[in-house]
Image (tube, rainbow, N blue to C red):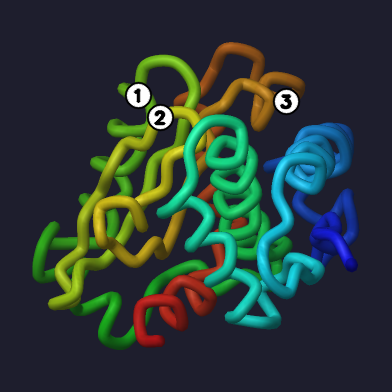
Amino acid sequence: MKKYELMALPYAPEALEPVISKETIGFHHGKHLQAYVDNLNGLASPPNPSPIGEGSLGELEMLKELVLHSEGAVFNNAGQILNHELYFMQFKPIGEAAHVPEGALAAQIEKQWGSVEAFKSEFEAKGVGLFGSGWIWLSADADGTLVITQEANAANPVQKGLKPLLTFDVWEHAYYLDYQNRRAAHLSALWQIVDWKVIEKRFED
């Protein structure tokens, strides 16, 4: 039976520099995420396992089902794979990323926060304020209302009935090689590589 495989990045390891270094990508994607994939393969045999990648919605949905209906080590590793999948696929090199949201998502952000910059400020503040390891998320509820949540460790907004759109990883392994203890600087820099077209598609789907 085919097992889960490490997702392939849609960019070269050095493509996100200087925001995220080649070295950080090597450890974060090549070692930390690989470990979660290896661990899950040793713990669970979900139906129709297949390589993880955003190209197939079914693969993401399978991970979401594991997150919703598992606990312990299966939950922790499936949650971290899902989180990292959404994280890595939302980025593009600085010169290729769409730097501002448009359309319905932009309108909703402006409706709720007044401006994109005000939203970013709150998002960063929630990321800085999350104690310990975890993730900061922008998600949408069933009515399209946007919500910023702090999720500890491997948790994901799908557990709260939300659709995850955008996430920043605040586990130290995501930024310590490049920023040391300057979490705030790391979060502020990430906007340079967020591709808002990806976030818009997640919102509209």
Please state, as top left, top right, bottom left or bottom right, where the C terminus lies in the image.
bottom left
Q: Nearer the viewer, residue 57 or 150?
A: 57
Name the element at disc 2.
Answer: strand
Asked whether, in this view, residue 149 is left or right of residue 74, the answer is left
Disc number lying in front (2 or 1): 2
Mark 3 / mark 2, whichever is N-terminal: 2
Residues under numbered marks 3 and 1 in contact, where contact means CB atoms less than 8 Å apart: no
Give me the C-alpha separation between circle 2 and circle 1.
8 Å
Mark 3 / mark 1, whichever is N-terminal: 1
**Residue at 31%, 87% in the rendered image:** 103
Give me the C-alpha separation between circle 3 and circle 2.
22 Å
The x and y percentages for residue 126 are 29, 33
Label 1 sits on what residue type? Leu
Label 3 belongs to which residue? 178
Marker disc for residue 102: none
Q: Nearer the viewer, residue 182 or 42?
A: 42
Mark 2 crowdedness (10 Å alpha carbons): few <14, some 14-19, many ≥20: some
Marker disc for residue 130: 1
Label 3 sits on what residue type? Asp
